[in-house]
């Protein structure tokens, strides 16, 4: 609280102490301190007088006439009256409860159906995060680096003759990943043929990922 | 709690036990004993005598029904005032807190005597209270009027003691600023005060 006329701590402390002193619940020490402060602080003394008057005004009996005898008679009559049973309310509550339960049940069924549909779909994402393992490489895959001077027709003819097809590449170093097409399998002969072919700079089997 | 308060609480507990056993005479004693302070307390919420009577009866209807469940965690008076406070708030929501037109109060029901000093004091207080919120009026009444401790008021209003302190502080500062002082000089406005 900020006072303009009296800003010192004692006045704030006096303001704080007034209710308990007026209630006569303050300690003797607190009471004596406040009285001492009021004796030499005109502003707080005026405040205290106003608070005393406030307490006096609040302790006056109610000015609104309410007859206790009449009120008590009505209360006793009310005690004797049968307690009205909220039949309509109960019916409405019952209907409301059933409606809410049905809504919750429907919601649960719908959520279950959506969940089943979601899990049944093979909805693997079309992206791969860096923390995930590399995409699996088909068995018998080879990395092949053709020479830059090799024509597309020669490259296609070579793949066709060895029953190979490109499944990846070229990567940063110009290597293609090739796998056997159809039921044929790559092996040492295919690898040797590739290495012996003019225009093929490198042919290596892809190391299998554990 | 002083000795008189302890004795009053012991009497209230005994009456409550009898009420729990179905003793209507005990209910009558309790009703008459609390009627005055409840009337004054509720008059800080509403000026309608019919609503005040309704709230007092709702309060004692609940006290009658729940007398057996009182475990003595607080004083009986704190328990009763708490019930009255909640019933009063409920009545305010249902009826509003507009003051009733004085002309509608039958003349014979007005207080038979109201000394000039009291009337002046009531007018002075009324000017201040009308500037306060309902909660501030309730706290001022419970602390200065009824004499409850801040802890008791917190139980009655079901809020932290800090909230009660804040409401009392703001109510006192507001009254300090709006109420004319004793000498009749204009109210002193304090800068920085809420």
Image: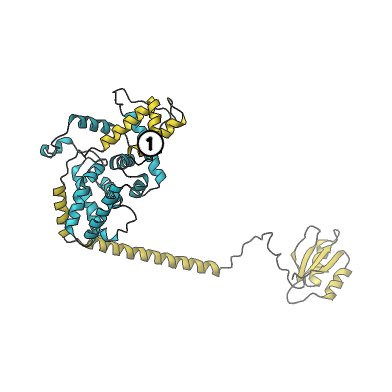
Q: Where is residue B182 shown, x and y percent of the image?
A: 29, 26
Q: In this view, does B106 lie above or below B16?
A: above
Q: Where is residue B157 shown, x and y percent of the image?
A: 34, 47
Whether residue A141 is visible to the viewer of this picture, yes or no, is yes
Chain that the image shows in cyan:
B
Could you tell me which quadrant the C terminus of chain B lies in? top left
Q: Where is residue A53 shown, x and y percent of the image?
A: 29, 32
As rendered, which of A48 and B6 lies closer to the eye? B6
The chain under label 1 reads: A
As rendered, which of B174 and A112 lies closer to the eye? B174
Whether residue B85 is visible to the viewer of this picture, yes or no, is no
- Residue neighbourhood size for the residue with mark 1, other residues' Cα within 10 Å, grouped as few (<14), some (14–19), many (≥20): some
Residue at (16% x, 47% y) in the render: A68
The residue identified by callout 1 is A31
B80 left or right of A180?
left
Quarter where residue B66 is shown: bottom left
Mark 1, secondary structure of its residue: helix
A25 left or right of B17?
right
Chain that the image shows in yellow:
A
Residue at (14% x, 49% y) in the render: A69
As rendered, which of A147 and A118 lies closer to the eye? A118
């Amino acid at each position: 609280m900020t006072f303009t006329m009296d800003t010192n701590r004692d006045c704030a402390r006096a303001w704080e102490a007034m209710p308990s002193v007026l209630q006569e619940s303050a300690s003797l020490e607190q009471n004596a301190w406040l009285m001492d402060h009021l004796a030499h602080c005109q502003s707080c003394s005026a405040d205290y007088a106003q608070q005393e008057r406030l307490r006096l005004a609040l302790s006056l009996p109610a000015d609104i006439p309410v007859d206790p005898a009449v009120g008590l008679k009505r209360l006793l009559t009310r005690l004797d009256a049968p307690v009205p049973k909220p039949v309509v309310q109960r019916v409405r509550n019952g209907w409301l409860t059933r409606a809410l339960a049905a809504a919750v049940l429907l919601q649960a069924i719908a959520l279950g159906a959506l969940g089943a549909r979601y899990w049944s779909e093979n909805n693997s994402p079309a992206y791969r995060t860096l923390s995930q393992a590399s995409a699996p490489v088909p068995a018998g895959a080879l990395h092949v680096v053709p020479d830059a001077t090799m024509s597309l027709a020669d490259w296609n003819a070579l793949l066709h003759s060895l029953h190979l097809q490109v499944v990846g590449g070229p990567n940063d170093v110009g290597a293609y990943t090739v796998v056997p097409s159809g039921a044929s399998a790559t092996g040492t002969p295919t690898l040797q043929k590739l290495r012996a072919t003019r225009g093929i700079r490198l042919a290596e089997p892809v190391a299998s990922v554990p | 709690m002083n000795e008189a308060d302890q004795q009053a609480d012991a009497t209230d507990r005994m009456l409550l036990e009898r009420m729990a056993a179905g003793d209507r005479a005990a209910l009558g004693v309790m009703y008459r004993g609390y009627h005055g302070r409840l009337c004054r307390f509720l008059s800080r919420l509403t000026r309608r005598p019919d609503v005040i009577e309704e709230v007092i009866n709702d309060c004692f209807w609940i006290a009658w029904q729940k007398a057996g469940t009182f475990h003595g965690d607080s004083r009986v008076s704190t328990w009763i005032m708490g019930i009255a406070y909640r019933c009063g708030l409920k009545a305010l929501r249902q009826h509003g807190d507009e003051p009733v037109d004085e002309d509608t109060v039958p003349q014979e029901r007005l207080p038979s005597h109201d000394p000039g000093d009291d009337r002046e004091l009531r007018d002075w207080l009324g000017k201040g209270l009308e500037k306060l919120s309902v909660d501030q009026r309730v706290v001022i009444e419970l602390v200065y009027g009824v004499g409850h401790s801040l802890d008791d008021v917190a139980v009655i209003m079901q809020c932290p003691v800090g909230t009660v302190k804040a409401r009392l502080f703001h109510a006192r500062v507001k009254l300090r600023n709006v109420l004319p002082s004793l000498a009749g000089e204009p109210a002193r406005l304090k800068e920085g005060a809420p």
